[in-house]
Image (cartoon, rainbow, N blue to C red):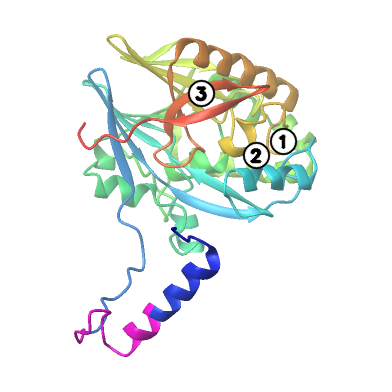
Amino acid sequence: MIDLTRRRLLTGAATVGAVAAIGVDVSGATTGAAASAASKQAPGFYRYKVGSIEVTVVTDGIRDAPLGNIVRNASTEEVNAALAAAYLPRDKFPYVFNPCAIKTGSKLVMLDTGLGPEIYAQSKGQAGQAHANLEAAGIDRKAVDVVIISHFHADHINGLLNADGTPAFPNAEVMVPEPEWAYWMDDAKMSAAPEGLKSNFANVRRVFKPLGDRVTRYGDNKELVPGITSMFTFGHTPGHSSHIVTSGSEIVLFQADVSNHPALFVRHPDWHASFDMDPVMAEGVRRKVYDQLAADRMKVQGFHFPFPSNGYIEKDGRGYRFVPAQWNPVI
């Protein structure tokens, strides 16, 4: 009988470890020094095709935060149970970030930009990795024609700047949702905002000021570049937008923040995230979008889904389930 109990496995591992420590392998032969352990991951990027369009997902890293009241209408016990069901640690929330570079054939496009080099330094490389991973993927930021922004939270816009405050994509037009720009650039709204929100108003102005007149605003259901169309999905922020990438018969929804980590907000679409500015509207949009994705078996790219963050949404009881797409060794 095979015995896979935790106690037996740990006892066996301890025995092998003790033998290895004195330089003898289990066959009796003397061994050399163990290879040095790696201190970091390989560069984080993954490519796939949407028809003739090439998508490169570049991880911006991950940041764990205390769980706190991340869900407004569920108890800590319920949220921890959902984390445990997904084999994630209790009492902390994993914020994952995945911007994308998209080659449409005529344009090189960035879709959101990550947290930027300042956070890379603060987090000792845990987050803010997008610029480095673009370079590792062979993508020159100077060659980017267009940066499309989904909304104005820091993890989506701060990568527009270098550490010295200069534009990180110096030759790119920066396209932003019209309602998002109108909200965050409204001085009256900034003055009336609660203290916790004022910092985001200030950050928006800090990021966009160096870009000058290179910022243009877009509306709903507009083809921004060939193959990429805007789709307003309000709730997370007043102008939050998703994007539909289409080539031939293939289509992918880049959903930005329709939901955050799928272990919580895909499984439980009725949970209201503390970072959704209009959580009731966000829930309604989430259900509408996910019902359509499930019915059409359409692929989705989730900014906050585990890297490489593309797959499918299917109905599962009163909620949904994220099914990762099969990894492909070729493009």
Q: CA distance from mark 3 to mark 1?
A: 37 Å
Label 1 element class: helix
- Regarding residue 207, the answer to whether it shows in the image is no
The quadrant of the picture occupied by the N terminus is: bottom left
* Residue nearest the observer in this picture, 19 or 302: 19
**From what the image shows, is residue 221 above or below residue 208?**
above
Identify the magenta region.
16-31
Magenta: predominant secondary structure element?
loop
Label 3 element class: strand
For residue 218, the mark is none
Residue shown at 62%/31% (left/top)?
267
- Regarding residue 24, the answer to whether it shows in the image is yes
Residue hosting label 2: 201
Q: CA distance from mark 2 to mark 3?
A: 33 Å
Where is residue 247, by image quadrant?
Answer: top left
Q: Is residue 124 magenta?
A: no
What amino acid type is highlighted by mark number 1? Met
Mark 1 or mark 2, which is nearer the start of the sequence?
A: 1
What amino acid type is highlighted by mark number 2? Phe
Label 1: few (<14), some or many (≥20) within 10 Å? some
* Residue nearest the observer in this picture, 300 or 276: 300
For residue 313, the mark is 3
Label 3: few (<14), some or many (≥20) within 10 Å? many
Verify CB contact (< 8 Å) between mark 2 and mark 1.
Answer: yes
Residue hosting label 1: 190
**From what the image shows, is residue 168 above or below residue 301?**
below
Residue 60, how many percent across, how many down?
43, 47
Label 2 element class: helix
Residue shown at 47%/54% (left/top)?
127
Q: Is residue 269 left or right of residue 192?
A: left
Residue shown at 68%/22% (left/top)?
318
Verify CB contact (< 8 Å) between mark 3 and mark 1.
Answer: no
